Image (cartoon, grey):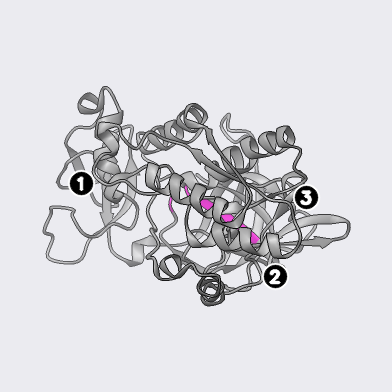
Amino acid sequence: MSGGIDSTVSALLLLEQGYEVIGVTFRTYDSMKDSCIAKEKGCCTIESIMEAKHNAERMGFEHRIVDFRDTFQRCVIQNFIDEYMSGRTPNPCVLCNSTIKWGEMLHLADELGCDFIATGHYARIAERDGHVYLRKAVDTRKDQTYFLWMLTEAQLRRTIFPLGEYTKDQVREIARSHGYEKLAVKRESQEICFIPDDDYRTFLRASVPDYNERVRAGEYVDAEGKVLGTHEGFVNYTIGQRKGLGIALGHPAYVTHIDAEHNRVTLGSNDDLLATELTFKPTLTRYTDIPASRLMARIRYRSQAVEVKTIKTLPGGEGLGEVCSLQFATPVWGVTPGQSVVLYDDDLVVGGGIIL
């Protein structure tokens, strides 16, 4: 329970369905550290923890506060730092869901004698051929399967998504009808929970001890390697970025490639960001017996899923283990190393991996 509308309504629905509920709110980072003091938000502030506790007490069930800060720092925050410092753009929510919200929480569920864990995510679960799959939510605008693709079948078998069959508007109405008017109108944050003011650059500067030695001014280049100007350090840029480049070329310029090793940032046109192929390191591979023509791929949360043309396993993988090549039927914009590619068969998640 985060103290927000989705987890609160999830608890209300579970109670109405006859479940015995124990609410759990966990701390995943220290929001009082200097690096996080710009704005307190997310599920780890004292305010949100107390709000979750109050909501649980109001509904009449036990509430627990657990401390996962060490695990979160080691598994999620450090990965976030390492990926950015390697020139990639990570998605920490994907890792947090698999290692913290399910990995650690299932251990806690066992300790508490709970059969299932439930969250306020917009997703569903479906069975096919004796197996359990993650399924898109009814509300496609809020569907969060992109962030949940790394969950295993064993984890899904012990999961309930109370909101999967509801739209966000319906969830707000349920909150209002139960007297949670403030939650029903509360604005939702779309930011990463441990990044104050959505400013990852300041966070990295405060979190990496040798930041100034590793992040230095470097060269902007074009696709042919011609030097165009000077940038402020590769870590300050992401694929597809247009604003804040600090360079005037007489035409719109976008970041098309980041070379962390040589501290070079490649600039190009909007069309240069179109691609028909990507490589990825697969983690979920339940698509191998499905014709590629049936698959759809999504490369970021807000992007439309695109038809897949082929998926091939590449030889070698340069010490990375199995690596696959995915070819799209139509071009996609802004393929970004470090992000997830998620594969769907209709509305079921059948595959996923990290883009290389």
The residue located at (53%, 51%) in the rendering is 340
Up-down relation of residue 170 to residue 54 (above or below)? below
In percent of width and height, residue 55 lies at 52, 54
Q: Amino acid at mark 3?
A: Arg
Q: Quadrant of residue 166?
A: bottom right
Give the CA separation, mark 3 to mark 2: 20 Å
Q: Which mark is residue 157?
A: 3
Q: Name the element at disc 1.
A: strand
Q: Which mark is residue 220?
A: 1
Please say whether residue 45 is visible from this viewpoint: no
Query: Are there few (<14), some (14-19), or many (20+) residues within 10 Å of tag 3?
Result: some
Give the CA separation, mark 3 to mark 1: 49 Å
Sequence-wise, the earlier of marks 3 and 1 is: 3
Between residue 25 and residue 310, name the one nearer to us: 25
The stretch in magenta equals 336-343
Query: Are there few (<14), some (14-19), or many (20+) residues within 10 Å of tag 1?
Result: many
Q: Name the element at disc 3.
A: loop
Query: Are there few (<14), some (14-19), or many (20+) residues within 10 Å of tag 2?
Result: few
Between residue 230 and residue 206, name the one nearer to us: 206
In percent of width and height, residue 36 lies at 29, 38
Q: Amino acid at mark 2?
A: Asp
Between residue 231 and residue 135, name the one nearer to us: 135
On screen, residue 145 versus residue 196, left or right, reads right
Residue assigned mark 2: 346
On screen, residue 279 versus residue 83, left or right, reads right
**Magenta stretch holds residue 340:** yes
Sequence-wise, the earlier of marks 3 and 2 is: 3
